[in-house]
Every structure is written in structure tokens, then in C-alpha cells.
Amino acid sequence: MPGALFQIGRSGADAARASLEVTSQNIANASNPDYARRTLSSRELVGISASGNGVLNGVRIEGITRFDSAIVQQQARQSASELARADTELAALRDTELALEQSSLFEGLVEFEAVLTQLEGNPLEPALRTNALETGRQLASTFQFANSTLATARGQVQASTAISLDDANLQAAELARITQTLANARDGTAGQAALLDARDAARRALSQEVGIETEFDSRGAVTVRLADASGAAGPLLVDGLTSSDITSTTAPDGTVSFAVGGAAVTPASGALAGQAAALEAQADYQIELDAIAAEIIALSNAAQASGADADGNPGQPFFTGTGAADIELALTSGTQLATAPAGSPAGSTNTTNLASFVASIGGDDGPIARTDTLLLGLSSRISAQEVTRTGLAAIAENAQATLLTETGVDLDTEAANLIRLQQAFEANSRVMQVATEIFDTLLGLR
């Protein structure tokens, strides 16, 4: 009897001590988002007496149980991945807007129109002609600056894409390594629980870069496919112990495409999806910027071709170039501005040709209106993206809160467990002390 009592007390004390260690670990990791709460599983240890009856022999530790919820984790991961896409795209669009606004292109076009309008009032005034010429030179520089700032914004997105791609491939390789280690981990051990935490942390980090779909086997090994925006099954990124790299190809217009193992894929979410969408938008804005520059070149040169300058000579091209990157002022003197209709004599004050030029610049479908539409469209897109981002942030926050409820650490609960387990440890120590006293009493009998 004393021996059985001692075994009961010792096994109970061992279980209480192990539970205290697990509870302490929970408290220490309460603020760790990649940590899942643990508990110690145990059961009664029952022996068989000589008479065939069950006899309580103490407590047997079964192992560590890690709280997990695949569905809740998936929801939290997907919502965070969608938020990462929105955040990335929004940041790139804001940089694009800043780049175009810093160039003051709209203001430059308005100033060009205003100076030409002023010249209409006194077409032979040398100072006004010189001012118009210099304003045209400044407008060409403005287009070049807008092209440069837009290229810089695009380069930043491309650099961020390369970083996100490297991180995604790194996390995929880490998942494969963890899966290999998990295959050798014993069930219910602290080591296995730590590996599962690391697996989920790698999945979370990977989903921040690219949307994924995951499956698990009975040992916790993970299979990962990229979530394709088309809705079709994406290519395998992690298959058990092996991982494949995501590769990218940059097109001449700056847009980027992705593939895994040669299979093309369009990421549905994550930073890579946001960066790809931003680069497509920037390519569209670049096309429109070049189109506006080409229109200014065409309108200016057409006006010059249909007019005569101050000396009665046929007008020469105003600008050279084909777009925002290479537009340059071609005229060298204010006297070369063809303000009068073709065939007019030297010193003509007829500004019919100049008036038509000014009207074409400020028309409803002219360069000024197109630039205004470009900037307003970009601003509207940013506003819509901000609304989308706010909604996704609320969804992601709610999903994360639900995940923490399922797998996170409640400090109040753990503090109560500490008191309870400490009392259990002391109680079992007292049982062992009683067993010892009984032995001493028995040995002291005469």
C-alpha cells in the first residue's frame, strides 16, 4: 500500500511539473503570433491486482497537445494575403500619383496654352515670342521629367517584386525542410509542436508574398499550390520534401509574369499579385503619357507646317521626338513661331493659325484634357483601392482575432492554471511524504 501510494504521488507530481512547464511556455509566448497554445495530455495509470481488479497506479503522461484549427488558419492566412495585395498595389499607385504630380505636367500644359494665348494679343512682340519658345522648352523638359519619375516608381515596384520573389522561394524551401524534419519527430513531443509552429509561420510568411492553397497528411507534412487568379488549380510549389522556385519574366513595358516549373501562373493574392497589378497600371499610364507627348508634338508641328513665321517663311517643326522620353524643342528663335496662316507676308499680325493651335491644345479631347483625365483617373483608382483596403483590413483583423481565440494564449486562464498546477504539485508531494511516513512507521514497529 505505501509503495502504490508513493507511485501515485510521484507520477502525479511529474505530471503537474510537466504541465507547469507547458503553462510557463504558453505564458512566455503569449505575444508570439506564430505560437499555438499547448496543453499536457495525461490519463490514469491502472494496474491489475492479484484478484483481477483494477488498481490505480498514478498518472501517465500522454504527450503535448497543440491547439490548431485548419479552417480558421486558412481564413486568417487568405485574408492576410488579400490585404497584402491591396497594401502593395495601393502603395505603388500612390508612388505613381506622386511621380506624375511632382512633374507638374498639367500645370506645364496650362502654362503653355496661356503663353500662346498671350502671344495672340501681340504676335510680333519679341519678348512674347521668346517667352513662348522658352515655355515650349520647359514643357519638353516637364515631359522628360514625368517620364523619369514614372520610370523610378516602376523601378521601385520591380525591385520590391524581386525581393518578394526571393522571400517566397525562401519560405517554400523552408516548408520543405520543416516537412522533412517533421517526418522524424515523435508525436506529442515539444519538438514536434515547435516544428508545427515553424511550419505555420512559414506558411503565413509565404502567403504574404503569394496566395497559396495547402493540404496536410497525417504527419503534418504540407503540400502547397499557388492560388491562381483564374480559379484553376495552380502549380505545385511544395510537394512533401521538395520545393519549386517561382520565376519571373519582365516584359519590355515593365510588366511582370510568373511561372513555377515552366507552368505560367497569375497569383490571386499576396504582395506579388499587388506588384504585378501595379506594374500593369504603370504600363498603362506610361502609354498614356507617351500618347499625350506625341499629341503635343503632332499638334505643334502641324500648326507650324500650316503657318508662316514672323519673316514670312514656312513654319518649321516645333518639337522633335516621339514620346515623353525624347521630346525636344526644335525651334531656335522666337521669330520662327508660325502665328500667321501659310503664305502670309513678313510682319503679318494675322493670328488665325495660332488661334487654331491654342484651341487644339485646350480642346475637350486635347492634351490638357487628357492629362487632367489621366490624373483624375489615377486619383479615383487610389480612392477605390483605399476603400477596398479598409474593408480587407477589417476582415483580416477579425480573422486574426478568431485565430487567436482558437490557438492564442489567454493569460488569465494560464495564470489560473499555474495556481491549480502548483497546488496539484504540492498535493502530490504531500502524498509522497505521507507514504514515506507510513514506511517509517512500519519500519519502527517492534
Image: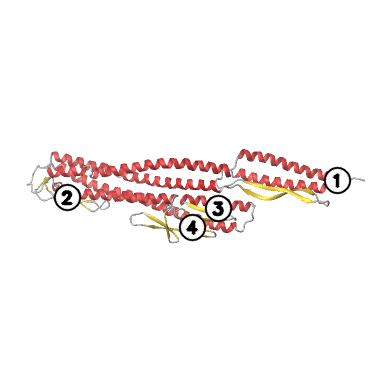
130 vs 213: above or below: above
Identify the mark nearer the N-term, 4 or 3: 3
Q: Which mark is residue 302?
A: 2
- Mark 4 or 3: in front is 4
Q: Do the residues labelled 2 and 3 touch (CB within 8 Å)?
A: no
- Which residue carries the number 3 mark? 199
Identify the mark nearer the N-term, 2 or 4: 4
Q: Is residue 143 left or right of residue 210?
A: left
- Which residue carries the number 1 mark? 440
Using the numbered discs, state the Cα–Cα distance from disc 4 to disc 3 in whole angstroms: 15 Å
Which amino acid is tagged 4?
Leu
> Residue 104: percent from the left, percent from the top?
29, 43
Q: Is residue 430 left or right of residue 393?
A: right
Which amino acid is tagged 2?
Ala
In this view, the residue in front, 206 or 97, is 206
> Residue 217: percent from the left, percent from the top?
57, 56
Identify the mark nearer the N-term, 3 or 1: 3
> Residue 359: percent from the left, percent from the top?
18, 42
The residue lying at 41 percent from left, 49 percent from top is 274
- Which residue carries the number 4 mark? 237
- Mark 2 or 1: in front is 2
